[in-house]
Image: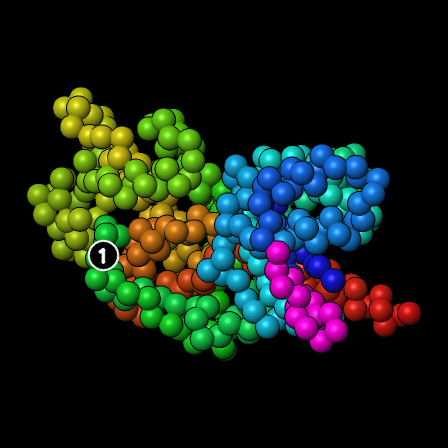
């Protein structure tokens, strides 16, 4: 009864997990509270006497009992979706992510809980579905069934919005150019009739798609400068180790101590071309001067890296929208996870440079749409197989 889809990206692996509302004799099963110690005791017991279904149900209860899953795993409880229907069963969708470079450990963990006894296929999308295909076969003895990344992304977006229409899509109002925006607020946006739109998938790298209907979409362009660039630069420049640490540093930094602005060159705004003095003229431009390097902090460098990457992708997204003659731009991807600064900067930039005709739109489930799409592909295949029987 448990179904899951995976999206294995360049930095994070995302899992969407369907938990059915299981009832026994008409009474809904109560969830057990399972700790890591409980799991350890289960792993150390005689596995010959254990049942694969019982083991997997215990693993599921462990996942649903905890927010932190191991060293890098997180269950995003705020995103869970109740009363979803798969194969005639009502249940809850849960959303989990962990570092993609821990996939081999994930497979070993699944093997311990006898996952191969329950299924012979793992359904996944993303580049990691190809990278880790041999590991899945060698460690689990299971086939990694791969689905197209872009198709899963679009399917996931449309499914999630259709089942979460009141709070999924939003834009930011009251934002400022530097992203601090203490008075900014989220405003719900009706995405019920979305076509056409541009979707910017902001992960380790960036892909930009033009979507004209559920079946008419294509990758228009992209960039190697994305979330992976931000974290890589921050690790080099500040010594941080994680994305969360890099964001915390950026929140406390001042990018104007690192970037050279229009006012640093013109003494003010460049009115002829409608360039405010606060516009970045040269990212990291101050760092060519030794006195400026002495004045900046690691937090300032992290903030400048965030501004550089965000401005670059915002500019590419807007030029793509103009070239495709599309007014609506939707930003998704795990770079935006808990990254309000970047979202507010994108919101301000699109509103300013379009003179109020365009809004940067965002979706609450950010980087999970590919995994949702993989789950839907699995569900479609199961339905097809059941119809043949």
Q: Position of residue 197 (x, y in %)?
A: 48, 67
Q: Position of residue 221 (x, y in %)?
A: 51, 51
Q: Is residue 186 above or below residue 74?
A: below
Q: Is residue 331 above or below residue 136?
A: below
**How many numbered marks appear?**
1
Whether residue 39 can be seen here: yes
SS category of the residue bearing label 1: loop
In the visual, does 273 lie left or right of 58?
left
In the image, farthest residue toward the top = 290
Q: Position of residue 306 (x, y in %)?
A: 33, 42
Q: Is residue 301 above or below residue 384?
A: above
What residue is pinned by disc 1? Answer: 181
In the visual, does 236 lie left or right of 145?
left
Whether 89 is among the magenta residues is no
Which corner quadrant holds the N terminus?
bottom right
For the residue pair 180 and 266, the one nearer the viewer reads as: 180
Q: Position of residue 24 (x, y in %)?
A: 73, 70
Which color mode does the image show?
Answer: rainbow
- Residue 138 sits in quarter: top right
In the visual, does 94 lie left or right of 52?
left
- Residue 280 sits in quarter: top left
Whether residue 212 can be seen here: no
Whether 21 is among the magenta residues is yes
Magenta residues?
19-32
Instruction: Write the residue at 77% across / 53% down.
Output: 53
Instruction: Write the residue at 73% across / 43% down.
Output: 113
Instruction: Write the residue at 42% across / 31% down.
Output: 241
Instruction: Write the residue at 65% across / 37% down.
Output: 40
In the visual, does 191 lie left or right of 128?
left
């Amino acid at each position: 009864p448990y179904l899951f889809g995976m999206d294995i990206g360049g930095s994070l692996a995302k899992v969407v997990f369907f938990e059915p509302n299981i009832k026994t004799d008409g009474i809904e099963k109560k969830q057990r509270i399972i700790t890591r110690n409980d799991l350890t005791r289960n792993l150390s017991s005689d596995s010959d006497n254990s049942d694969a279904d019982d083991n997997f149900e215990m693993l599921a209860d462990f996942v649903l009992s905890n927010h932190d899953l191991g060293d890098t795993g997180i269950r995003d409880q705020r995103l869970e979706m109740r009363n979803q229907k798969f194969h005639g069963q009502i249940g809850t969708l849960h959303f989990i992510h962990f570092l993609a470079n821990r996939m081999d450990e994930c497979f070993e963990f699944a093997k311990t809980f006898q996952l191969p006894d329950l299924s012979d296929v793992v359904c996944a999308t993303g580049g990691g579905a190809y990278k880790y295909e041999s590991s899945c076969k060698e460690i689990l003895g299971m086939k990694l069934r791969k689905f197209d990344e872009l198709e899963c992304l679009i399917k996931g977006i449309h499914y999630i919005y259709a089942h979460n229409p009141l709070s999924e899509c939003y834009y930011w109002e009251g934002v400022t150019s530097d992203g601090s925006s203490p008075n900014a607020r989220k405003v719900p946006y009706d995405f019920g009739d979305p076509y056409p739109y541009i979707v910017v998938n902001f992960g380790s790298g960036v892909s930009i798609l033009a979507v004209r209907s559920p079946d008419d979409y294509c990758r228009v362009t992209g960039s190697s400068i994305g979330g992976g660039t931000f974290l890589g630069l921050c690790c080099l420049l500040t010594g941080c180790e994680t994305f969360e640490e890099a964001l915390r540093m950026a929140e406390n930094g001042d990018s104007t101590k690192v970037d050279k602005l229009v006012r640093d060159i013109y003494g003010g705004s460049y009115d002829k071309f409608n360039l405010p003095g606060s516009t970045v003229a040269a990212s990291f431009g101050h760092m060519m001067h030794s006195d400026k390097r002495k004045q900046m902090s690691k937090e300032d460098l992290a903030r400048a890296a965030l501004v550089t990457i965000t401005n670059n992708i915002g500019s590419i997204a807007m030029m793509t929208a103009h070239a495709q003659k599309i007014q609506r731009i939707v930003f998704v991807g795990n770079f935006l996870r808990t990254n309000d600064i970047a979202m507010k900067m994108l919101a301000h930039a699109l509103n300013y440079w379009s003179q109020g005709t365009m809004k940067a739109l965002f979706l609450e489930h950010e980087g999970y749409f590919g995994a949702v799409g993989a789950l839907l592909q699995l569900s479609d295949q199961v339905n097809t197989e059941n119809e043949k029987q």
